[in-house]
Image (cartoon, helix red, strand yellow):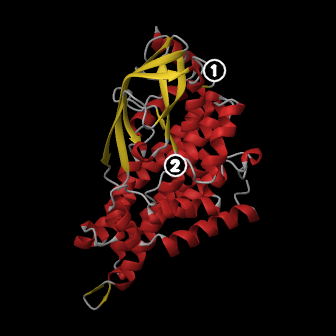
Amino acid sequence: MDFSFNEEQQQLQEAVSRFVRGDYGFAQRHAIVASPEGWSRTAWQGLADLGVLAINVPEAHGGLGFGPVETALALQAAAPAMLCEPVLASAVVATVLVRDAGDAAAQADLLPAMAAGERIVVVAHEEAAARGEVRWVETRARADGDGYLLDGRKAVVLHAAAADELIVSARMSGAPGDAQGVSLFRVPRDAAGMTVHSYPTIDGLRAADIALDGVRLPASALLGAEGKGLPAVERAFGIGLAALCAEAVGTMQAMVDATVEYLKTRQQFGQPIGRFQALQHRTADMLLHLEQARSMGYLASIRCTDDDDTERRRALSAAKVTVGQAARFIGQQAVQLHGGMGMTDELDVSHWFKRLLAVGTRFGDTDSHLQRFAALSRSPATTALADE
């Protein structure tokens, strides 16, 4: 199988790499993290000018019309900079959801503005009780006159405070966990009855818990068909998970490179510590984990749009498990091999470690995906026996 990239893909990756090296250094990111907003509008516009925000937007709406592979390359190239801007939340997950679930009017209204960096949209779907299960939705919506009323809670919605608009999932029928009955609604950031409690995450991003108390919306706020929104959310989250794996691979590559360079320069007993065989073995193990994660990241990008629901979910869970285990190993080894300095905020290593720690919890943690992979891998006969 040929894993080489075409000229357009290589140019995109190189452009993103140049941007983060030149305009998003360690000092710039530190200032962004410490700012009241927690993200940079200048950097956001720079990403828009590069075309990063338009990767998943169809050409008919002013986008590049690319897909998961190009998204993965861009996220992997940007990973060493640990971007604080809502690229994954808005330019990937929300954009894909609008593209796949929205009608022509919603697409024409949102996609060009999102591609140009003029509007930020994020998806408020996950809830505290869901524990990574996409189908678990307790938030309720009901018809009210010529509109809808929303009530419920959403948890850890990345970049919610920065969004101009949120796409909120709410159940109109059925019980939490049912595959049907969930609708999607466009909710303005300043909607009456919606409270956004924002806070920083361990890796320097901003997230929010959202309370919806009698949020009244017009009929036009419905995105897609009533009660049919969950499959589109699952697809968008699958593409987002593949992009997240690519970002983790880029972060791990940066950690391995920094660790190898440190071992070449740190002197002990009159020689670089990289000459000690025990440390060479540890870096070799880091490289093995990195290449396994890279391969599974490629698999996730290729399979995240499969029509076969079972195979798609199996591949994504397998990738999340492999990448999560590699991230844990490489992160711990990088910090330990840097010694005491690896724990300080003065080095990128500690910040990369925090980013990988956060990555491990997004779109479901390693344990939940391992359980899902095992369940999806059972033969029909075994599953039937287990259910008896």
In this rendering, is residue 233 above or below 331?
above
**Could you tell me which residue is drawn at 57 percent across and 46 percent down?**
92
| Residue identifier under label 2 | 88
**Could you tell me which residue is drawn at 56 percent across and 34 percent down?**
314
Cα–Cα span, label 1 and label 2? 25 Å
Mark 1 / mark 2, whichever is N-terminal: 2
In this rendering, is residue 56 above or below 212?
below
Give SS at disc 2: helix
**Could you tell me which residue is drawn at 52 percent across and 41 percent down?**
318
Query: Looking at this rendering, what residue extends furthest in the left direction?
Result: 340
* Three-letter code for the amino acid on which mark 1 is drawn: Ala
* Three-letter code for the amino acid on which mark 2 is drawn: Leu
Give SS at disc 1: loop
What is the crowding at mark 1: few (fewer than 14 residues within 10 Å), some, or many (at least 20)? few
Question: Which percent across, then down, holds residue 146?
Answer: 55, 13
| Residue identifier under label 1 | 225
Closer to the camera in the image, 202 or 309:
202
